[in-house]
Image (cartoon, rainbow, N blue to C red):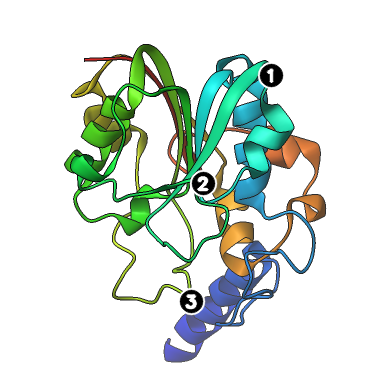
Amino acid sequence: MIGVIATRLRGRLAGRAVLLGGRRSTQPISALWGNDRGTPIDRHFIDRFLDEHRGDIRGDVLEMKDTRYSDVFASETGVVDVLDIDPDNEQATVVGDLTRPETLPERRYDCFVMTQTLQYVFDLGAAVESTARLLRPTGVALVTLPSVSRITRSVGVEREFWRFTAASARRLFEERFAEVQVRTYGNVLTCAAFLYGLASEELTQRELEDRDDFFPTLVTVRASRPL
């Protein structure tokens, strides 16, 4: 009897290995989110989101860290500023802290492009309030948030605080904006592939486009009309 149970168990484990595609390593294929293999999967989704909303990236624009997305997706822009808390960032034209609104301009921008930032901010309420204060009454915030991701090695395990769902993102932004659209990208395969460090080019278009609300890789927010 014990031998029969052991045989069945081995069979189940063998089937599980097949379901995992034979990948049993506890180490990622790439420790750089797939940057060394191609386009990281989350960046593929960010590009799609911003491309879909390129009409919002207009007028006076603020972007986090650098102008990588404004340079590609913006049209009819006026001033393009870069926000960073780090004064050593030579691209930063606005040095300020999202949790300290007194360090930031008020009602200055028509669009704020904030990608993959809020996971590093502990006081989310203050950061979203500052986001609203930065925008003019007709302004739009385009925000991306990780639902699944490794911890950033250069930041460290003590300085990365959050992962997000569609529900948490909606609650956060509805408290400060009159109109909030939340959308997720990804599925169980993109989540697993992203954690292992595969690049988007290593998945098919169908695999990337398939959306499963129960397995989001990335959460996106379009928030307009600040309260």
Q: Earlier in the sequence, mark 3 or mark 2?
A: 3
**Image location (x, y in percent) of residue 153:** 48, 76
Left-right relation of 182 to 65: left
Task: Check if mark 3's residue and mark 2's residue have beta carbons within 8 Å.
Answer: no
Which residue occupies 66% across, 25% down?
74
On the image, the x and y values in percent for residue 45 come to 63, 39
Judge whether residue 91 can be spotted in this image: yes
The amino acid type of the residue labelled 3 equals: Arg
Q: Nearer the viewer, residue 160 or 41?
A: 160
Q: Out of 125 and 164, give the one closest to the viewer.
A: 125
63 relative position to 47: left or right: left
Provide the secondary structure element on which disc 3 rests. Answer: loop
Is 226 displayed left or right of 54 in the figure? left
| Closer to viewer: mark 2 or mark 1 | 1
Q: Nearer the viewer, residue 200 or 47?
A: 47
Amino acid type at image mark 2 = Thr
Q: Is residue 106 above or below residue 115?
A: above
Going from N to C along the chain, the mark reached first, 3 or 1, is: 1
* Residue marked by disc 2: 217
What is the number of the mark on residue 153?
A: 3
Residue displayed at 18% across by 40% down:
125
**Residues at circles 3 and 1 in contact by the CB criterion of under 8 Å:** no
Q: Nearer the viewer, residue 208 or 135?
A: 135
Q: Position of residue 129 (x, y in %)?
A: 22, 32
Q: Is residue 106 above or below residue 157?
A: above
